Amino acid sequence: MLQESEKLKLQKISELLKAFPDNDLLITGHTAMAGTQQARQKLSEERAAAVANYLVQLGVKDAYHIFSQGLGGEKPIADNSTEEGKARNRRVEITILNK
């Protein structure tokens, strides 16, 4: 599900994340406001899980220390009435959790 360009970004990010060996990670998926609420929720969960799984493959953390969640289109960071805004809302955020 991850595009090669996104894998390259995650490979670079993974090096930074390795500086926090004792911290768990929270991966949160988001979508634009297209489709049904149920479809947005499912897509956001799939996005987050794809990133979390790839970070596990890269050896950043084991699966017990990476948590993923999807928020659908509930927390936009841009206007969903433009294509540029929709593109910005289609995202995954990585949070380094406190110990």
Image (cartoon, rainbow, N blue to C red):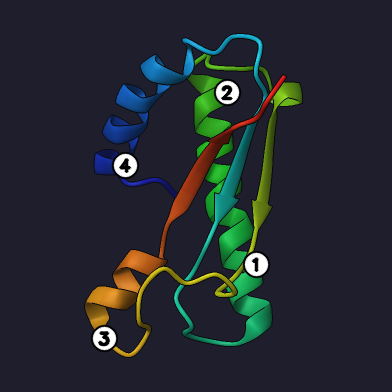
Q: Amino acid at mark 1?
A: Lys
Query: Distance from label 1 to label 2 (Cα)?
Result: 21 Å
Q: How dense is the environment of label 1, judged by Cα within 10 Å: few (below 14), some, or many (20 and up)? A: some
Query: Distance from label 1 to label 3 (Cα)?
Result: 23 Å
Q: What residue occupies the far right of the structure in this picture?
A: 64
The answer to whether 85 appears left or right of 41 in the picture is left
Q: Amino acid at mark 3?
A: Thr
Q: Nearer the viewer, residue 3 or 9?
A: 9
- In the rendered image of this protein, does residue 42 appear above or below residue 32? above
Q: Earlier in the sequence, mark 1 or mark 3?
A: 1
Query: Distance from label 2 to label 3 (Cα)?
Result: 34 Å
Q: Earlier in the sequence, mark 2 or mark 3?
A: 2
Secondary element type, mark 4: helix
Q: Earlier in the sequence, mark 1 or mark 4?
A: 4
Q: Earlier in the sequence, mark 3 or mark 4?
A: 4
Quadrant of residue 42 in the image?
bottom right
Q: Circle 2 sits on which residue?
A: 56
Q: Circle 4 sits on which residue?
A: 6
> For the point 61% across and 17% down, which residue is it?
61
The answer to whether 36 appears left or right of 78 in the picture is right
Q: Circle 3 sits on which residue?
A: 82
Nearer the observer, disc 1 or disc 3? 3
The answer to whether 8 appears left or right of 46 in the picture is left
Q: Amino acid at mark 2?
A: Val
Quadrant of residue 41 in the image?
bottom right
> For the point 68% across and 79% down, which residue is it?
38
Q: Circle 1 sits on which residue?
A: 42
Q: Earlier in the sequence, mark 2 or mark 4?
A: 4
> For the point 32% across and 65% down, which residue is it?
88
Q: How many discs appear?
A: 4
Instruction: Give the percent coordinates (x, y) of residue 97.
Output: 65, 30
Where residue 7 is drawn, which disc sits there? Answer: none
